[in-house]
Amino acid sequence: MSHSTSTPDKRVEVAVGILLQGTPGQEQFLLGTRPAGKPYAGYWEFPGGKIEAGESVEAALCREFDEELGICIDPAAVEIWRTTEHDYEHARVRLHWCKVRAWQGDFQMREGQQVAWQGLPPTVSPILPGAYPVLDALAAERAHAME
Ligand SMILES: Nc1nc2c([nH]c(=O)n2[C@@H]2O[C@H](COP(=O)(O)OP(=O)(O)OP(=O)(O)O)[C@@H](O)[C@H]2O)c(=O)[nH]1
């Protein structure tokens, strides 16, 4: 039974990009470090960020890719793949994971972050805890494709 006094499930909505390149079945994805001054600074994460009021997932991702990496992606080429949730001490987030295979422009690390193309399992660490379920999902998808 629900109670009118119960706390609503208020989560921060986040658009996250899985930028993919390379041979199908062995594609690499881009990870970057979180800039100084943010919670979990220095941890590796997929590029992305909070969805602003009134913004679609695709539009938020386009804006974040421009702000963080200086690249332009076509909203029509964004494949919204799955959604996960994670509870941090600082926030409860809902992550909208999107696969992106095409972009325009050369990378510019506009937040002074490091970036690295990674395979499975990734070799960089530490990785944001909220990213682990999607790394598992990518590994499961790849294993399934090889069956
Ligand atoms: N970008 C990104 N965020 C992630 C991932 N995994 C994960 O749990 N998150 C969480 O999603 C949230 C993203 O917020 P953010 O602080 O990076 O977003 P933002 O760039 O819009 O922040 P701002 O408010 O400082 O402008 C953080 O709570 C972060 O911990 C990931 O792989 N990539």
Image (cartoon, rainbow, N blue to C red):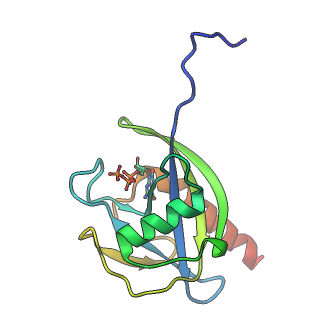
Q: Where 71 sits versus 59, above or below?
A: below
What residue is shown at x 32% (from left), y 58% (from top)?
Answer: 43
Question: Can residue 41 be seen by looking at this rendering?
Answer: yes
Q: How many labels were placed on the picture?
A: 0
Q: Position of residue 56 (x, y in %)?
A: 59, 56
- Quarter of the image for residue 45 reads bottom left
Left or right for 16, reference 34? right
Q: Position of residue 116 (x, y in %)?
A: 37, 77
Q: Position of residue 34 (x, y in %)?
A: 31, 60
What residue is shown at x 63% (from left), y 51% (from top)?
Answer: 83
What residue is shown at x 65% (from left), y 76% (from top)?
Answer: 77
In the image as oriented, which residue stretches furthest toward the right? 147
Identify which residue, 56 or 117, lies in the foreground: 56
Quarter of the image with the C terminus in it: bottom right
In the image as oriented, which residue stretches furthest toward the front? 54
Left or right for 10, reference 89? right
Left or right for 146, reference 127? right
Q: Position of residue 41 (x, y in %)?
A: 26, 55
